[in-house]
Image (cartoon, rainbow, N blue to C red):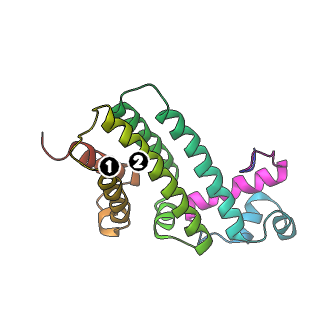
Amino acid sequence: MKDTKGKELSPKMAHLVDKAKELFFRYGIKRVSIEEICRESGVSKMTFYRYFPSKTAIAKHVLESIYGEGRERINSILAMDLPFEERLKKVLVTKMEYTDKYSREFIKELMMGTELELKKYIEEETKNFLNELRKIFLEAQKNGEIRSDIKVDFIIYMMNVMREVFKDENLQKLYPDFASLMKDAFNFFYYGVLK
């Protein structure tokens, strides 16, 4: 396993990160303690602190690896020589595959924001993703693959609004999992409600 800068992790650190990731995915970041991470990974607290100064630091490391891997997969999809609609569907499938791995609690924490440092990181990643998506929409509009009478900035704005709507717990309760909610949102956004 490599760190977020491509440097190989020691086996002990890789195991520690893997166990933290498993716990965060299952229970969310808030609920997991450093003690639990140490117990599950079989390392002492002293060893934990040798690698990470805090739970927030290991959580950020986990998020950086998730976002980095996701970014690579999505960028490779967006670079494919396929029609816009196909690329967009593949991006959605990739996002749904990722959300299927996580508990509701973990996703909720990512969307609502946990600690300030993690929230800033997530906001920056989201901003970068939307900027990349904007370029793809502009290209698709130029190629006549999407309507030219709708501003791309409006589309991106509405996608951001949808992210905020996803935070609504009443909406979340209508779906068995987050991937199902994303699928309906994509279909509504892309195809509308008309047959």
Q: Nearer the viewer, residue 77 or 32?
A: 77
Would you name the residue on which mark 1 appears?
152
- The majority secondary structure of the magenta stretch comes to helix
Answer above or below: position of 59 versus 73: below
- Residue 114 location, x and y as percent? 55, 72
Q: Residues within 10 Å of mark 2 (few under 14, many from 20)?
A: some
Q: How many marks?
A: 2
Image quarter in which the N terminus is found: top right
Highlighted range, magenta: 5-28
Q: In the image, is 86 to the left or to the right of 18?
A: left
Amino acid under disc 1: Val
Image quarter of residue 93: top left
Name of the residue lying farthest toward the bottom: 116
Residue 82 horizontal/vertical position (percent): 40, 26
- Amino acid on which the number 2 mark rests in the picture: Arg
Do callouts 1 and 2 mark residues in contact (Cβ within 8 Å)? yes
Q: Quadrant of residue 62?
A: bottom right
Q: Is residue 31 magenta?
A: no
Q: Secondary structure at mark 1?
A: helix
